[in-house]
Image: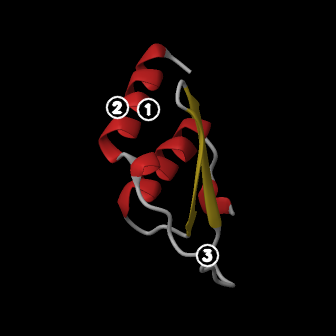
Amino acid sequence: MTSDQVDALKKLLADQALFQEPPETCAFGVDGSQWIFELVDRDGYKMVKRWSPEKGSAQKLGKHLIALSEWDIDTY
């Protein structure tokens, strides 16, 4: 990653505060996907799961990370 990409990711993590959100229920579905985000920092390990997020911080962060991968997800 370039330093600009790292800075943008850090800003997104700070602005969206996904890892400070309360956990969601254990609900899931049969059509969609489970998005799992992991973070390790000086405070330790954190993990957040969201089922097919359509809005909010998980959706914004996930789309940003997918864009960084340069994958063509429309194919999938």
Q: Are discs 3 and 2 less than 8 Å apart at CB?
A: no
Q: Are discs 1 and 2 less than 8 Å apart at CB?
A: yes
Residue to which mark 2 is pinned: 11
In the rendering, at what x and y percent does residue 57 appear? 39, 54
Colour theme: secondary structure
Q: Are discs 3 and 1 less than 8 Å apart at CB?
A: no
Write the residue at 46% across / 15% down: 3
Spatial separation of the CA atoms under disc 3 and disc 2: 29 Å
- For label 1, the crowd category at 10 Å Cα-Cα, with few meaning under 14, some 14 to 19 and many 20 or more, is some
- For label 3, the crowd category at 10 Å Cα-Cα, with few meaning under 14, some 14 to 19 and many 20 or more, is few
- Front residue (pair 33, 22): 22
Element on which disc 2 rests: helix
- Front residue (pair 2, 37): 37
The correct choice, above or below, for 27 with respect to 66 in the image is below
- Front residue (pair 28, 26): 26
Mark 3 vs mark 1, foreground winner is 3
Which of pointers 3 and 1 lies earlier in the amino acid sequence? 1
Element on which disc 1 rests: helix
The amino acid beneath tag 3 is Cys
Write the residue at 50% across / 63% down: 23
On the rendered image, what quadrant is the C terminus found in? Answer: bottom right
Residue to which mark 3 is pinned: 26
Spatial separation of the CA atoms under disc 1 and disc 2: 5 Å
Most distant residue in the left direction: 15
